Image: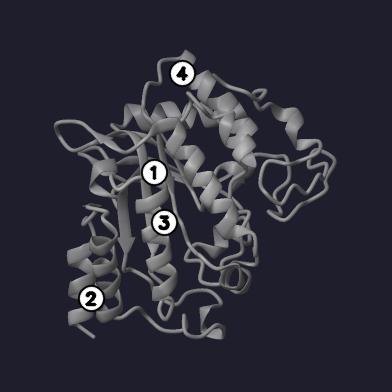
Amino acid sequence: MKTTAPLDLHHYRKCRLCPWNCDVDRWGGDLGRCAASARLKVDDYMLHFGEEACLVGEGGSGAVFFSFCTLRCRFCQTHEISWRGTGSHIEVERLAEIFLWLQEEGAENLNLITPGHFLPHIIAAIHEAQSMGMHLPIVYNTSSFESVEVLRTLDGIIDIYLPDFKFWRPETARRLCGAELYPDVAREAVKEMHRQVGDLVLDAQGRALRGVLLRHLVLPGHLDESRHILYWLAKELSVHTYVNVMGSYRPCHQAKKYPPIDRALSREEFEAVEKCVKESGLYRLDKTHRLLNYLIWSKR
């Protein structure tokens, strides 16, 4: 049972959609930490075949990339979208049309990428699209920098949570994404996601239906952070948590200014973290991109 009022467009008046709780009037033109106004902005949408295999299936994941972000990761691979906010302003009706178009094109799911700061628009578009026949599982693709109170309003709406647990230590989070409170926020947010949908459930064809699929990008020189995150997942969430330990890190955006993330991840570092996965008790490890990583390392 939901314990909080549903989101609507009035929430932009004193915006508290993310843990920064800026209280700014985005309708009135004020900007908070995310730098997004109250006008919905989308950078792109597509059938995305680069996600985990259980999300891609045969038709691809129906990805919608929302402009701006509540974090400022120094190594952001999509900084044009997340920092600069590239994209186009659209209305709720157009967003609903996009959702329906993705379904018509054969998408396996609706993949909302960095959606939190536009949730009132998105929820309205979901309801409109569903009233016109959209039935795709809905994926909430997030950095995990989410308000638990806001997440509770999504209970019964989101089928699959796709959180990225980035950092364990506050000082690391402050240095690399400008948010010292990130680790505490992420732990509580991931717990709430798991409370709502549980461990990831796959159908007979291996497609994700419901649950949490957690990503962790391994950062060069930060293996202890990875170890803490993995052991926490096994102990505090579930040993059945489906985890994608990503070895695809490369220095992007401002990373060259922040050693040791000014270099690529090594094969040895990745294998050390994979060993931590096994030692933690976690056993559902996604391997969609593992071979590609090894091919890249073999060419260095």
N-terminal of the pair, mark 1 or mark 4, is 1
Q: Which residue is drawn at 38% across and 55% down?
A: 215
Question: Disc number at residue 232?
Answer: 3
Residue 207 quadrant: top left
Classify mark 1: helix, strand or loop. strand
Cα separation, mark 2 vs mark 1, equals 26 Å
Amino acid at the residue labelled 3: Trp
Q: Do the residues labelled 1 and 3 touch (CB within 8 Å)?
A: no
Q: Does residue 231 appear to the left or right of 83 in the view shown?
A: left
Q: Position of residue 64 (x, y in %)?
A: 46, 42
Question: Disc number at residue 296?
Answer: 2
Q: Does residue 75 appear to the left or right of 90 in the view shown?
A: left
Above/below status of 184 relative to 132: below
N-terminal of the pair, mark 1 or mark 3, is 1
Label 4 CA crowd tier, 10 Å (few <14, some 14–19, many 20+)? some
Q: Position of residue 70 (x, y in %)?
A: 63, 54
Kindly identify which residue carries mark 1.
46
N-terminal of the pair, mark 2 or mark 3, is 3
Cα separation, mark 4 vs mark 3, equals 37 Å
